[in-house]
Image (cartoon, rainbow, N blue to C red):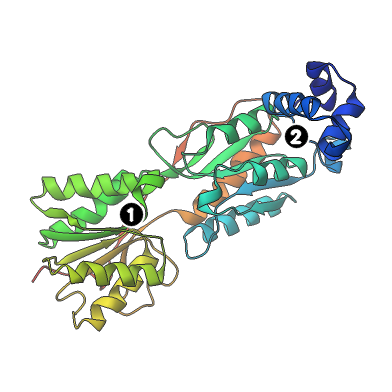
Amino acid sequence: MAASLQDVARMVGVSISTVSRALHRPEMVDAATRERINVAVAALGYVPQGVGRALVSRRTRSIGAVVPSIGVSAFGQTIEALRQGLGMANYTLLLAQPSIKEQADLSPLRTLIERGVDGIVLLGNDCPPPWIDLITKNDLPFATIWADSGNALAGAIGFDNYVAGRKAAEHLLDLGHREFAFISGHLAFNQRARQRYQGLLETIAAGGGRLSRDLIAETDYGFAEGYQATKELLGKRLKFSALICGNDYLALGATACLREHGLSIPNEVSVIGFNDSQFSAFVDPPLTTIHFPSVEIGMLAAKTLLAAIDSTEPMPPPQMLPTFLVKRSSTGPAA
């Protein structure tokens, strides 16, 4: 059961009104008492509950999601599918979007809990432990979306990024490519990107190919970033016949740069992306990519959370969905 104001007061040995003043009118409480109260609040995971939690049902029919700024990413389709799935059950989705650099900050999550949400959605496997602790202490079910199959938590919905990377590499190896370049998201901060990289790196090596560290660029996911990263790779004047991009946005920026430098796609350089974004079939040339189950993840997350809200059973084991190659015109036989 979630901690109450009374629990905080009991732990500190002060009145409920003192705790309330410390939280809402801190200037009225001496510094030493405020510090003791803050320590107790953190230890208990206490979050003031929104007006909805005062209802007899203790339900607000809302779900909170903490997802970094969507921008040019594949998460938009997942969030829309999540919203639609919840809406079919008359639930509302409340969205907090901290930047990647603010993921250690508990404030967005605390705000959602204060609003009285009935469940939480987080992104990926590498959720900060304080977030999980705060959710657990407030007795809320939570699901993680876009989780990787490695070390996924109960309630996770995602896919195997290692296999996705392997499929991209196998396709290019089958076309005769042996010299590769790779544009990735930031590997240190993204388990999904690391697993994808590991899958393609090991597959390339096993197939007799080569991916030099000098031909790996790490950047933010975006059109302009893909363009700039490709420009830097070309500037090294190292040979590659296949360019693997960490998502379709990077791939589209990359194709623009390759063409600007007079390189034909796929006759001179094959380009492959990940996600199978909505635009991928309509660019020139249409983009070969690995299809990710973006919509299915959102729908399944809604179904999983709604079931958990009405149940005393623990969250289900991780649910991993399939990925597959979508072959289009941006890849072809090695010259």
Q: Is residue 4 visible?
A: yes
123 relative position to 14: left or right: left
The crowd level at tag 1 (other Cα within 10 Å; few <14, some 14-19, many 20+) is some
Residue under circle 2?
47
- The residue labelled by disc 1 is 324
Placement of the C terminus among the 4 image quadrants: bottom left
Quarter holding residue 28: top right
Q: For the residue marked with disc 2, what is the amino acid? A: Val
Mark 2, Cα crowd under 10 Å, few <14 / some 14-19 / many 20+, is many
Q: Position of residue 20 (x, y in %)?
A: 87, 32
Per the image, label 2 sits on a secondary structure element best described as: loop
Evaluate if marks 1 and 2 touch, with contact meaning CB atoms under 8 Å apart.
no
Question: Image quarter for residue 174?
Answer: bottom left
Quarter of the image with the N terminus is: top right
Provide residue 44's location: percent of width, then percent of height: 71, 24
Cα–Cα gap, marks 1 and 2:
43 Å
Q: Residue at x 80, y 43 (%)?
A: 60
Q: Amino acid at mark 1?
A: Phe
Residue at the image point whose x is 40% and y is 71% from the top: 223
Residue sitting at x 79%, y 18% = 12
